[in-house]
Image (cartoon, rainbow, N blue to C red):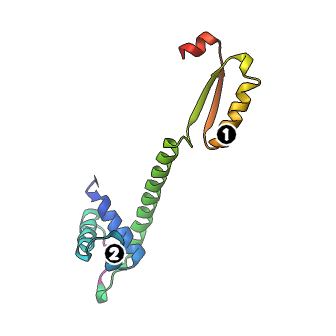
């Protein structure tokens, strides 16, 4: 996947390098070769127009631009993780809206018990109740 010239793989290589502190550590973490990580980092610098690392004395040291960019990359990966968690919660019915249509006669005894059970089982789900006639409930 590419976003305006950037690839997720480039961002993963950058993030792994920042966390590991070295290209070899990033390569190990990503289960790829060291030259692959180096290539991805070079492509990222070209695509962004940023100098992300100072490559003096045989070590990579993040530049000010690299540190600032890392802050944004970290937010992006955190946001992606949140999306994955949200999808899981939606899939497992832990999040969302439960809409209940009920007759007036049932709304005082049966529905409150059912809602309490729903809230116990799915605490993050929201519940809305509509008291309607039987004709309106069937047509909904």
In the image, residue 124 lies at what x, y percent? Answer: 61, 43
The answer to whether residue 88 is above or below residue 110 is below
The answer to whether residue 81 is above or below residue 62 is above
**Quarter-of-image position of residue 104:** top right
Examine the structure image and report whether residue 72 is included in the region drawn in magenta. Answer: no
In the image, residue 84 lies at what x, y percent? Answer: 45, 51
How many numbered marks appear? 2
Residue at the image position 26 percent from the left and 68 percent from the top = 40
**Quarter-of-image position of residue 58:** bottom left
Q: Earlier in the sequence, mark 2 or mark 1?
A: 2
In the image, residue 11 lies at what x, y percent? Answer: 34, 63
Sort mark 2 into few (<14), some (14-19) or many (20+) by Cα contacts within 10 Å.
some
Label 2 to label 1, Cα distance in Å?
44 Å
Residue at the image position 30 percent from the left and 72 percent from the top = 51
The answer to whether residue 115 is above or below residue 6 is above
Secondary structure mainly formed by the magenta segment = loop
Is residue 65 visible in this depiction of the protein? no
Is residue 86 visible in this depiction of the protein? yes
Q: Tell whether 66 sits left or right of 91.
A: left
Residue at the image position 59 percent from the left and 28 percent from the top = 99
Point out which mark residue 119 bears: 1
Residue at the image position 73 percent from the left and 25 percent from the top = 110
Question: Helix or strand or loop: what does disc 2 sit on?
Answer: helix
In the image, residue 55 lies at what x, y percent? Answer: 29, 82
Q: Tell whether 27 sits left or right of 140.
A: left
Quadrant for the C terminus in the image: top right
The part of the chain drawn in magenta is 51-55
Front residue of 77 and 121: 121
Q: Say which residue label 2 marks.
A: 28
Point out which mark residue 94 bears: none
Q: Tell whether 83 sits left or right of 27.
A: right
Front residue of 56 and 115: 115
């Amino acid at each position: 996947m590419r976003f305006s010239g950037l690839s997720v793989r480039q961002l993963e290589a950058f993030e792994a390098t920042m966390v590991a502190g070295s290209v070899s550590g990033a390569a190990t973490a990503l289960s790829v070769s060291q030259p692959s990580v180096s290539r991805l980092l070079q492509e990222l610098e070209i695509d962004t127009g940023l100098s992300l690392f100072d490559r003096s004395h045989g070590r990579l040291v993040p530049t000010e631009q690299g540190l600032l960019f890392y802050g944004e990359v970290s937010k992006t990966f955190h946001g992606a993780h949140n999306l994955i968690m949200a999808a899981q919660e939606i899939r497992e019915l832990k999040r969302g809206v439960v809409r209940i249509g009920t007759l007036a006669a049932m709304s005082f005894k049966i529905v409150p018990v059912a809602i309490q059970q729903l809230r116990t089982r799915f605490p993050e789900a929201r519940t809305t109740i509509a008291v309607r006639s039987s004709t309106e409930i069937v047509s909904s």
